[in-house]
Amino acid sequence: MPVTTSRPLTSLRSVRGIRWRAITTRTLRSRRALVVAFVALHLAFLAWLLPLMLAGAVDGDLPLYREWAMHALDHGVWVGVDADWVYPVGALLPVVLPAVFGAAAYQLVWFLLLTAANGISLWVLTDAGRRRSAYPAAWWWLAILLILSPVALLRLEGFTGPMVIVALVLLGTRPRLASALLAAAAWIKVWPAAVLLAALIASGRRRIIAISAGLTSLSILAIAVAAGGLWHVASFLTTQGSRHLQLESVLGTPWLWMAIAHVPGAEVYQDWALETREVSGPGDIWIMENGTGVMLAAVAVIAVLIGWAHRRRGASDADMRLFLTGALALATAFIVFDKVGSPQYMLWLAPIVVVGIAQLGRAWRVPTVLLTAIAVATTLVFPLFYLQLIDLDPGAATVLGVRNLLLVVLLGWTVRELWRLGRDGGGTSAADAAVGFTRTGRSGLVGGTARPDRPSRGASTPSR
């Protein structure tokens, strides 16, 4: 009989597979590997941007940022204070700060500030590398920064994303600082208000959170008004409200396909003031006039759902899954129902998912997988296939359509989860307890340390 070697070969492959998985696991749980990956990634970013830096040039949205900054420093005209602006007035800090060393150094200083922000977010997320359970979240965050690097490096979200990660991690142990960070981030880009709203609804510490966030906002407003910005400090609300349908927005999808199908009156055109592409066509007037109202209505419905689920679960402080799901639902609604649909908006969702991975692990698989696919599709659309999209290529439009559909699916998942959490009730889940979350006011939302053998004062026994 012939001698068969299939079984030994299979066993050898199995052994090699086990060894490879063991090496991979050790690497992913290694502090040194994480630090090396962070440094290597940002050195790669530096190499990519170095020609721009050497030429004193800028890319992405930075030409606009630098123009605003130089007008402020050279001519004393501060947007948001002396003139209407598309961003909240707090965005002046990250916009103007890179210009203090001159226009030619703007790209370099911007990059160094972003690198510092990303490093701080990983430091806090992993507790200076001591919290190994957060390493998968840290690796995923680095992957998202790589996938979305065309916007993560060249948009204001590059600052607000790390700020929200730090705030979420600190919310349980230092709620005053965390809520102040969230409020400050919301005065740079509005989206962190979604996280703040979820915390106010789902937290037993809402009074502390409200006071700290309120004082931070009042301080920013006071500085702006004292500088003479009374009539312009709220201009970002009206400026955004008057915008048309952006090419990549979820709401703009029907009009994009109308333009592809050559429907009379449907077109893609350039908004030169904001350097963006927009779509128009039959029936777009209603959504342009009422889009903001639709978004606010969706946010209100989700907020009510979070509050209902919180009451049904009978917790004196919200559990981790309810809070993070609510924050993700609100942030996703901000995107799905917005007339604007820029690629950097995906960085609104990533910080929430990062902390969800760190705190909930496998229970957060669905949003992790969905957002990874959304990020890949987003970068395929911009910048890789963006020229084809402008030229109304059906293939590029299909990729964008898939991305937008996945955003709707993600919103649907969060709403379903909120409904399920409220319907099931029962207070703190086993997953929440496993990551150190309790229903007491002492442990807070994120980063609290549960001691099963020594419950905090005021703790109650979860009912099932």
Image (cartoon, rainbow, N blue to C red):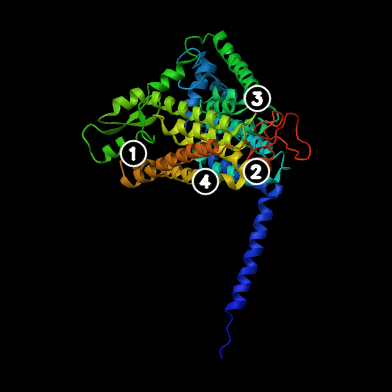
Mark closer to the chain start, 2 or 3: 3
C-alpha span from label 3 to label 4:
29 Å
- Hey, which residue is sitting farthest front in the picture? 464
Secondary structure beneath dot 3 equals loop
Tell me the tag on residue 390: 1
Dot label at residue 366: 4
Nearest the camera: 35 or 100? 35
Identify which residue is drawn at 70% across, 30% down.
173
Residue occupied by mark 3? 205
- Tell me if mark 2 has few (under 14), some (14-19) or many (20+) residues whose alpha carbon lies within 10 angstroms of its own: few
Quarter of the figure with residue 174: top right
Give the label, 3 or 1, closer to the camera: 3
Q: Nearer the viewer, mark 2 or mark 1?
A: 2
* Res. 58 visible in picture: no
Q: Earlier in the sequence, mark 3 or mark 4?
A: 3
* Front position among marks 1 and 4: 4
Q: Mark 2 = which residue?
A: 430
Amino acid bearing label 4: Val
